[in-house]
Image (cartoon, helix red, strand yellow):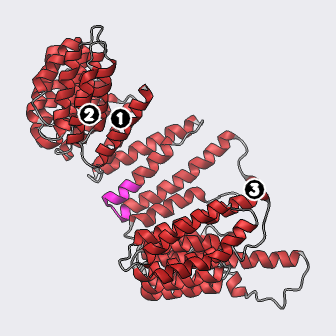
Amino acid sequence: MAEIIQERIEDRLPELEQLERIGLFSHAEIKAIIKKASDLEYRIQRRALFKEDFISYVQYEINLLELIQRRRTRIGYSFKKDEIENSIVHRVQGVFRRASAKWKDDVQLWLSYIVFCKKWATKAQLSKVFSAMLAIHSNKPALWIMAAKWEMEDRLSSESARQLFLRALRFHPECPKLYQEYFRMELMHAEKLRKEKQEFEKAKMDVGNLDYPEEILKGELARIIYKNSVSIMKDAEFHVSLLSIAQLFDFATDLQKEIYDEADTSKPLCSLQVLHTDDPLTWDYVARRELAMETQPAGEQPATKQARAVEVGRKEERSCAVYEEAVKTLPTEAMWKCYVNFCLERFTKKTSSQFLRERRLERTMMAFRKAHELRLLPEFQYKQWIELLLHQDFLKEALEVAVAGTESFRDSVMMWQMKLQVLIDSKSPDVAGLFEEAFVHLKAQVCLPLWISWAEWSEGAQSQEDTEAIFKKALLAVKGADSVTLKDKYLDWAYRSGGYKKARAVFKSLQESRPFSVDFFRKIIQFEKEQESCKMANLREYYERALREFGSVDYGLWMDYIKEELNHPLGRPENCGQIYWRAMKMLQGEPAEVFVAKHAMHQAGRL
């Protein structure tokens, strides 16, 4: 093995001599490079090979290449690249080849190889890397797409990209992403050829000898991909995705019409609706498309704000007419969800037109009401409806909807919260009773948000005794990890309402009721430090209690404890050494390493 390493080091000598001769590196730096290279060569030549050693080798060589580039720029020397950089690049490629041959399944390694080749190697070399990778990872469509895009965009070879897509589709005949990207690639190729032809014609050059087939210029290849793909991919989402891609290309209007099927005006429905009439996405797309369609010639667009608002209103009415037809043809929750979402989106869109705002609000309320009457309104949209009513100060209607929502979704915390919110906003005397009613219908493990809401409401509306009683009831009902948040809230409330004395009493009552959060202890420590007569004995008590719970994982507590002993007027700096060694016994792994580093920095800062 020593002979192999020696031979590889000797192979480096010409480039190293050149680096020293032209003044990019000093003699001492060359010696350091040889020493480091010997170590790296040894690691990748030994019998037991590790991937990390190959990665370290490559990273070192890349760093060396970048350093050479920076120094060339600094001294303005651009010669001898064949003898220096190309030699290093060739060596790195050899290391990548060995690594990718041994760890074939590591996609990240292949991608690193590709990134290196893109920056430092030739296009022909990168093509070979893609071919080798795809021979092993042919089961990953994303890699086929990456290779085809590179061929198309970097090598400017549409034929190579086309061949890659065709090979990929043999492996993945039902992959929608492959069809989408292949479709996009053919349209991009057609657009590129059209622009080239236009440039030649502008220059009055003869294009008769150049190959510009009319079929390709019109996007015929993309049309074939569309026809073949929709016969395999039957869902509406895929169909719509191809139409969205085609709409990015101005020249493909005929293809867009074919996909949407507007050419035959005698048909009451477009091809999307014919093929996917039972899919809400189809109707949603068709309805939204009405907003983008121009009803007047370009030169006759409305000039005033009022006229533009009227035109937008007409477009929205046409969209809603499609939705109305949709919910009759497909009366499902998913279809109504699309309709309501559209109405909400248009309502939240800013406009200075009072007419448009009122019409949008009316339309939105109507959609909500109809979906509710048909019992096809999902839970989340009940919430949206209530929020909209509250925003418009329709408190009576909001309460009616909230009552209907809780009847439809009795086990939903969100619906009970919305009903309570309506009662709180309307200053109803029934709030406390409704909280009690909610707990009857809901499972205990999902009630934490309601307990918190009740306590927060009580703080502003009831006495301290009532609020504390709510917290105590909540702690009896909420167990496990959920109780952590509740304890933090209880301690915060105690300090706000009764000061430090009350907070300390609450802390004492809870200090054995596990589990806790670190913040629970940090809060009481902070409350103590805010007092005029901050007692070190109390701080020690809190720190010791916190370290019993989190001393094995939270290095910050140990550091804060040490700083407190050092900085507090009544602190005992002599205790710091003992605290340090206790921390070293309890902390393990990374927390211990961070603690040692933080402690060392703190000590250096004090000196």
Q: In the image, what residue type sits under mark 2?
A: Tyr
Labels 1 & 2 near each other (Cβ < 8 A): yes
Q: Is residue 334 magenta?
A: yes
Specify which label sits upstream in the sequence, 3 or 2.
3
Gap between marks 1 and 3 measured at Cα: 41 Å
What residue lies at 20% left-to-right and 35% top-to-bottom?
582
Q: In the image, what residue type sits under mark 3?
A: Arg
What label sits on residue 599 in the rendered view?
A: 1
Residue farthest to the top? Answer: 532
Gap between marks 1 and 2 measured at Cα: 9 Å
Quarter occupied by the N terminus: bottom left
The image quadrant that residue 406 belongs to is top left
Highlighted range, magenta: 328-338
Viewer-nearest residue: 193 or 61: 61
Q: Indicate which label's residue lies in the foreground, 3 or 2.
A: 2
Q: Residues within 10 Å of mark 1 (few under 14, many from 20)?
A: some
Task: Report the residue marked by disc 2.
Answer: 580
Q: Is residue 159 magenta?
A: no
Labels 3 & 2 near each other (Cβ < 8 A): no
Labels 1 & 3 near each other (Cβ < 8 A): no
Gap between marks 3 and 2 measured at Cα: 49 Å
Viewer-nearest residue: 159 or 195: 159
Decide if residue 463 is in sight here: no
Task: Report the residue marked by disc 3.
Answer: 74
- Image x and y of residue 274, in percent: 45, 75
Left or right of 507: which side holds 577?
right
Q: In the image, what residue type sits under mark 1?
A: His
- Image x and y of residue 173, in percent: 43, 85
Decide if residue 566 is in sight here: yes
